[in-house]
Amino acid sequence: MPGFQFSGSQEEVVPAPKVLVTGATGLLGRAMCKEFQNGGWLVIGTGYRRARPRLLRCDLTDEDAVRGLLHEYKPDVIVHCAAERRPDVVERHTEAAVNLNVHATSTLAKEAAVCGALFIYISTDYVFDGRNPPYGEDDSPNPLNVYGRSKLEGERETLRHCPGAVVLRVPILFGEVESVAESAVTSLWLKVQEESCTLDHCQQRFPTDTRDVAAVCRKLSERARQDSSIRGIFHFSGKQQMTKFEMAVTISQAFSLPSNHLIPLTEQPAASALRPINSQLNCSRLELLNLSVEPQPFASAISDCLWPFTPDKRWRQTVFH
């Protein structure tokens, strides 16, 4: 029966747990909704500019709208995926980014505390400067750019207003995309097909599949509802260390495409926002609590994401969809 679970020897019907996912139209939010739905949760997804059928349209910077939303739907868990996550965009449009990354987070955390919901805030490895990896949950943050500072401030607002909240820091994400430009990882597909292309071979990244992040969030939610000690800061990351050049070479190899046109750039590329050289996350807290998942190898995971953009996509969609 959708929306209900059976409990106890006499099959007592109890409502399924309810999760509200912000940014449900985005890269991580879509994976989050799918994971919780597959786990038997009732999912309420919110979007704004890209809101679509079966999702609620909500301006998260409108405090009254957020308050009304939570009081009406009374979720057991809130997973806050909505954010401006493009560092260069944050540098250019700082006020709008801070409104979403900090002020909206503050409002959600306050209201989660009022309604008794578990609040999970998705943060970033960019809260660290990258000079002394790997970074544990208790290491001192020192963000290099406005994006990192805004997410760190969002963490602080989260834990100040909702002490029982969970902060989950993750690195660069990829997943099932609506267009390859939606992720800095899948956008490398376009580079692979250029005649000649230089790619950063300095910054060490840990590309992480949104499906794995969503699975961790569901495990955290289910455990935290039973164990109030599950709170505070956690780290989750893919395990393969790669530069963008190495990711592009791996993508080329996965699809049997040439890679000799890809040129490694061994100096920091010019960009409007500084990036940490290596902000590797130590994920031992999740692992010790048996709340982590084993990431799929990058080559197979990125192949899953990019198959729809290959020339044989129509055949595959006919067969498999």
Image (cartoon, rainbow, N blue to C red):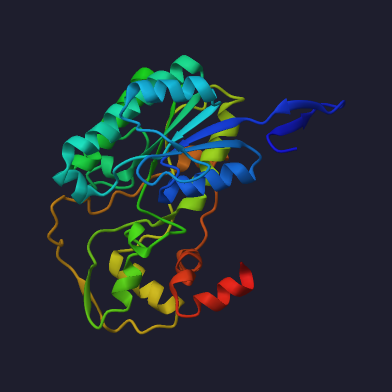
Q: Residue furthest top?
A: 114
Along the line of sight, the residue nearer the viewer: 206 or 24: 24
Quarter assignment of residue 123 = top left
Q: Is residue 125 left or right of residue 284?
A: left
Q: Is residue 12 left or right of residue 19?
A: right
Quarter assignment of residue 191 = bottom left
Along the line of sight, the residue nearer the viewer: 32 or 128: 32
Q: Residue furthest right?
A: 10
Q: Is residue 277 visible?
A: yes
**In the figure, 103 relative to 149: above or below?**
above
**Percent of width and height locating residue 98:** 23, 34
Number of numbered tags placed on the structure image? 0
**Percent of width and height locating residue 42:** 61, 35
Q: Is residue 289 visible?
A: no
Q: Which residue shows up at 63% across the image and 46% down it?
A: 38
**In the figure, 211 relative to 75: above or below?**
below
- Quadrant of the frame with the C terminus: bottom right
**Percent of width and height locating residue 301:** 49, 63
**Percent of width and height locating residue 175:** 45, 57
Along the line of sight, the residue nearer the viewer: 312 or 263: 312
Q: Which residue shows up at 42% across the image and 51% down it?
A: 27
Q: Which residue shows up at 17% across the image and 39% down it?
A: 94
- Quadrant of the frame with the N terminus: top right
**In the figure, 114 relative to 231: above or below?**
above
Q: Is residue 208 left or right of residue 73?
A: left
Along the line of sight, the residue nearer the viewer: 287 or 145: 145
